[in-house]
Amino acid sequence: MRAVVQRVREARVEVDGKIVGQIGAGIFVLLGIAKPDTTAQADYLLEKIVQLRIFPDAQEKMNLSLLDTNGELLVVSQFTLYGDCRRGRRPSFDDAAPPEKALELYRYFVDQAKRRIFRVETGIFQASMNVYSVNQGPVTLILDAPVSV
């Protein structure tokens, strides 16, 4: 499982011109799910994300987590994070989980997040979305869950 994590001032997702998910200050996550992933990878990645110390404290040092700041979370499924571009010009998505499995783990990740975070918003799985975010910092990190957790 792979996540692109951005500290944002605000972020939103639109489908067909309508806002389907929107947050204020917090973390925007693009979440990719691979074929071998399980709930163990989802649990690991969620715990890592909510405890990342990427928010400034009173001295402007990155010492606070999403939990410390009561920040919000926007999660968007993104199978293209497993696009392999090493050969040719067209990405191969062979490592991405099939849609049924990806949806199951995406829902699991979001459900677990809702147990930890005050406000969790999402995009719409497999929809064509427009994503808007104001990256604060900018702070952008790429996280990978180990194959075996």
Image: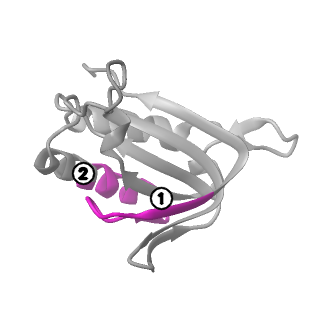
Give how far across and how far down residue 68 sits, in percent. 63, 49
Q: Amino acid at mark 1?
A: Leu
Instruction: Write the start and end of the magenta stretch as one range.
Output: 107-133
Q: Quadrant of residue 16?
A: bottom left
**Along the viewing direction, whichever of 132 and 49 lies nearer the viewer:** 132
Using residue 121 as the reference point, say whether residue 36 is left or right of it.
left
Q: Residue at x 34, y 63 (%)?
A: 128
> What is the number of the mark on residue 93?
none
Q: Circle 2 — which element?
A: helix
Disc 2 crowd, CA 10 A, few/some/many (<14, 14-19, 20+): some
Q: Quadrant of the N terminus?
A: top left
Disc 1 crowd, CA 10 A, few/some/many (<14, 14-19, 20+): many
**Along the viewing direction, whichever of 51 and 127 lies nearer the viewer:** 127
Using residue 73 as the reference point, say whether residue 97 is left or right of it.
left
Give how far across and how far down residue 58 sits, in percent. 85, 46
Q: Circle 1 — which element?
A: strand
Give how far across and how far down residue 140 sits, in percent. 61, 38
Give how far across and how far down residue 111 sits, in percent. 30, 57
Circles 1 and 2, Cβ within 8 Å, touching? The answer is no
Tell me, yes or no, whether the highlighted magenta stretch contains residue 129: yes
Using residue 89 as the reference point, say whether residue 35 is left or right of it.
left
> What is the number of the mark on residue 74?
1
Q: Amino acid at mark 2?
A: Tyr
Q: Is residue 60 above or below residue 110?
A: above
How far, Cα to Cα, is label 1 from label 2?
A: 15 Å
Residue where numbered disc 2 is placed? 108
Q: Residue at x 67, y 40 (%)?
A: 139
Disc 1 versus disc 2: nearer the observer: 1
Q: Quadrant of the C terminus?
A: top left
The answer to whether one can see residue 6 in this image is: yes
Furthest toward the bottom, the residue is 18
Q: Residue at x 26, y 30 (%)?
A: 92
